[in-house]
Structures are given as structure tokens and as C-alpha cells.
Image (cartoon, rainbow, N blue to C red):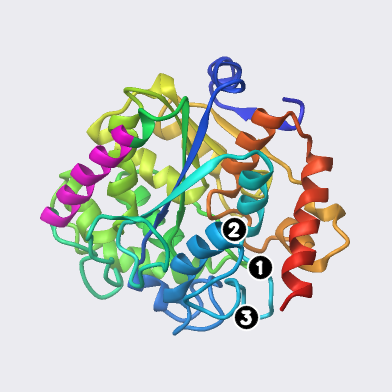
Amino acid sequence: MENFELFGNVSQAQHFLESVKSGRFLFSFVISYTETCEIPGITFAGANKDSIQFTPPADAEYLHYGYCKTIDTIPMTPDGKPTPGLLTKTALESSSISHLTINAGSKIPPQLPFIETDLSFGKNILTQDAMSDSQVSRAVDYGRIVGRSMASLTDCLVIGESIPGGTTTALAVLKAFGFNAKVSSSIPNNPIVLKNKIVNSALERIDSEHPYSIIAKVGDPMIPFVAGMLSSGSDVSKIMLAGGTQMAAVLAFASKIGFNEKNTIIGTTSYITNDESANFKNLIKEIVDIPAISVNPNLENSQYSGLKAFSEGFAKEGVGAGGSIISSMLKTGNNTTKFLELVEKEYHRLFTSL
């Protein structure tokens, strides 16, 4: 546990870690989409505007196969920095943690077996409502069904996501619920001015304080779906929300619909908790009294610039990377030195086979 930093309710975090470290883990990977990501300059989750829609399914395929089918290479930034899925895949494989993909509004389905919810992708919140109230209700209901089913199979259900542009919709949701949020970005120069302009425009359309209506106006499909998973899953098992800003928005909405706080934790990377352009640690405390755990993968020590980039502010988190690394270390007893060795091996495999 010396590799982890604990925030918030520390005694609950210690109890959570002790209770799951000899148990079974299951990773659920929720892929989704918001057309908000197509606004120029808002995200680096893809080489260009047209390729962004392929990022969630490609992330899912890479976790499963070690390569992608919907695109020719793994998801990368325009200058070749790899998806944080590389960290997730290394963590899951090195600890034999099973995973399952859930399509909760991805524009493109992945080419592999997955759970299909038939949820629609979210619209661009700058110009229109993301969803209808009934779509939000359905996302919550379907999330509850999937969450309870998956949580009953394991001692700790780890939930990660891939939704390009999701930090912007998360910011809108957090602000709509009254939180003074400052959120992270997939790029070092967080486009705060652009995000706030989009969010402020979206907030003007809110005409109801009902939580479902707020999500419908300014959210995305991932948020109500994962909140539904948390709501039912936390009744039967431990839940680790693997992510940063987007999972803060999930918590904000889940606190409105109910979940078991004692069985819930957030797991992320130190690149999120140390991000000075955001206020993640204080935000979680403000939303709900649950602990957060962060892990530093020590990627600044890598021989590869593409891995070092994570420690320099690119990507920071995503595809459930932080929670997957934490789960992997708990299960295997590996430390960050061993993890770095494994992730460099995977990086080498990927980029010498291209």
C-alpha cells in the first residue's frame, strides 16, 4: 500500500483496500460518446475530428486483442502519444483480471463481444440538449441492471470509461449541481476558457432542478449509466470508480439517486490528483464522504518519451487506468517499479510491431 496515496475518508480507504486485496476483481469498461468532443480544441482523444468517434471502440478492442480492428493502430494523440488503455491493458493482463465491455452510447460499436444497451450517443451541449429525460431514465435503469449483475460476480467491480470530450460534459454537470468544479484535461494546456464558454452556454438552457433533467440538458450517456451501475452494484459488492473528472460527475449524480457510500471508492492516477488546473481532491470531498486513492505509475522514469508524456500532463487518466493499476497491485503485490517494467514491455511490443 506504500505505492498509494489516500484522500478524504482515509480509514474507510484502508478498510476498503484490506477487504478487497485477497478477493476477486472484475473490470467493466463503459464506452460512450458525446458530440461535444467534435468542438475544435476540446480534446486530444484522437488524431482528428473524424477519428475521435473511433477512440472508444478502439480502446475496447485494444484491451481485448492487443490491437484494434475499427482503426489501423491504437488510439493516439495527433503527435503519436498512446491511449492510457496501454496502462490499463498492462495492469489487467499482469494480474489476470477479467474485463467486459459495455456499449452505453458509443457512436461506433466495437468489433468484439460486448453488452449492448442500445443507448443513443449524447448531442453537442453547446448547441442542444444532450439527451431527453426519458433517455436519462433508461440509462439509469439499464445501468442498474448491468451493475447488479456484474457486481454479484465479484468482490470488487472496477468501472472505467472512454468518452472523448467527457471532461467538458462532466464540468457542466458538476456546475449545474452547484459544485465549484475545475476539471482536468487530456492535454497539458487545459482549454479552460473554451470549456467554460461551452459550459456556461449549456447551463443557460437548464429550466428544471430535477437531476434527470439536468443530466439530459448538459450531460452525456455515460454519467447516468455508470451512476445506475454504482447505485445497484454498491448494494452487493465493493465498487471502484476508475477515473478522474468524469467519475466525479458520476458521483454527483449518483448522490441524487442513491448508492452505498461505504462500499464505494474512487481510484485514479497521481496525474489527476496533482493536476493544479483542477481541484479533484477537494471536489470529491465536497460531493460525498467517500475516499479516493491515487497511484503514481512513475512513468517519468521511462526510457520512452510516449510513456513519459503521461507524467508531463498528456492524457493523465482514462480507460480506467488508475483504478486498474491499483487493483492489479492489490492482487499481485507488484510495486510501481515492476509495473513500469511491464508497461515498457507492452509499449515496446506495440511500437516495434507497427
Residue 163 is situated, as x and y percent measured from the top left of the image, at: 43, 62
Residue 41 is situated, as x and y percent measured from the top left of the image, at: 51, 78
Question: Is label 1 in a helix, a strand or a loop?
Answer: loop
Which residue appears at 52% of the width and 47% of the height? 244
Q: Which mark is residue 78?
A: 3
Which residue appears at 23% of the width and 34% of the height? 257
Q: Image quadrant of residue 190? A: bottom right
Q: Which mark is residue 82?
A: 1
Tell me: 9 left or right of 215.
right
Relative to 276, say whether 330 is above or below. above
Question: Is label 3 in a helix, a strand or a loop?
Answer: loop
Relative to 130, say whether 331 is above or below. above
Q: Circles 3 and 2: CB distance less than 8 Å?
A: no
Residue 255 is situated, as x and y percent measured from the top left of the image, at: 31, 33
Report the amino acid beneath label 1. Pro
In depth, the one of 50 and 170 nearer the eye is: 50
Circle 2 sits on which residue?
85
Residue 30 is situated, as x and y percent measured from the top left of the image, at: 40, 53
Q: Circles 1 and 2: CB distance less than 8 Å?
A: yes
| Image quarter hosting the C terminus | bottom right
Per the model, the C-alpha gap separating discs 3 and 2 is 16 Å
How many circles with numbers are drawn on the protein? 3
